[in-house]
Image: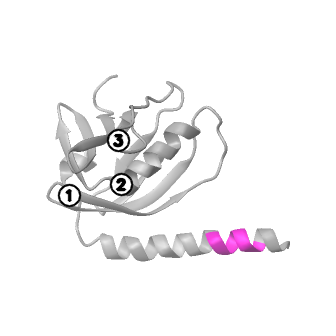
Amino acid sequence: MSRQKFNKMKTNLFSTLLGSVMLMTLACTSPKSDLTATEWSLVSVRVKSGDTLLTPRINNIPTLKISSDGTISGTTGCNRFIGNVAVTGNTLKFGGIVVTHVFCPNAMKVENAVLNAFNSVDNYTIENGLLLLKKNSEVYATFQSSLNTR
């Protein structure tokens, strides 16, 4: 086995172990049922504060599923991810997110923005079937319930 493959395996193993530890730590607080009742589809996302909103291509729409045990899963529009979230009231903290590594040239900008949003946001609201992930009062990502049509 080459040294490069061995190092990549070590990195993936470390990420998985770190994700498991984060999951056990964060799973102490369960998300509200309004978060877990549906799969969410991305409507728009911004990379950082003040940036213009990006919208996904129709064939590369990121999704987010939040389970009642605090685990998350979904797609970035290209890659799949798993991780966890701690929710207390309307505050939340994503952690331990592990992502597959496929290159999709037409979806990478939105993917990077989605992953950045997960790392940046600290609260949420649900309004008219839309999940708004926010940092302070600024919306970083808007997801639509799969129960609603686009």
Q: Check contact, mark 3 vs mark 1: CB within 8 A.
A: no
Inspect the image, locate mark 2, and give the three-letter code of the amino acid beneath it.
Answer: Ser
Q: Assign the N terminus to one quadrant of the image.
A: bottom right
Residue 143 image offset from top left, x and y in percent: 32, 37
Where 62 sits versus 71, above or below?
Answer: above
Q: Earlier in the sequence, mark 3 or mark 1?
A: 3
Counting other residues with Cα less than 10 Å from the Cα at mark 2, is it few (<14), some (14-19), or many (20 or more)? Answer: some
Q: Assign the C terminus to one quadrant of the image.
A: top left
Q: Is residue 23 left or right of residue 87?
A: right
Where 58 sits versus 20, above or below?
Answer: above
Counting other residues with Cα less than 10 Å from the Cα at mark 3, is it few (<14), some (14-19), or many (20 or more)? Answer: some
Looking at this rendering, what residue extends furthest in the left direction? 89
Question: Do we see residue 136 in this rendering?
Answer: yes
| Residue at which label 2 appears | 120
Q: Nearer the viewer, mark 3 or mark 1?
A: 1
Inspect the image, locate mark 3, and give the three-letter code of the amino acid beneath it.
Answer: Glu
Q: Secondary structure at mark 2?
A: helix
Q: Magenta segment, which residues?
A: 6-11
Residue at 32% of width from left, 55% of height from top? 67
In the image, residue 87 lies in the stretch drawn in magenta: no
Res. 39 mark: 3
In the image, residue 7 lies in the stretch drawn in magenta: yes
Q: Distance from label 3 to label 1 (Cα)?
A: 19 Å
Res. 109 mark: none
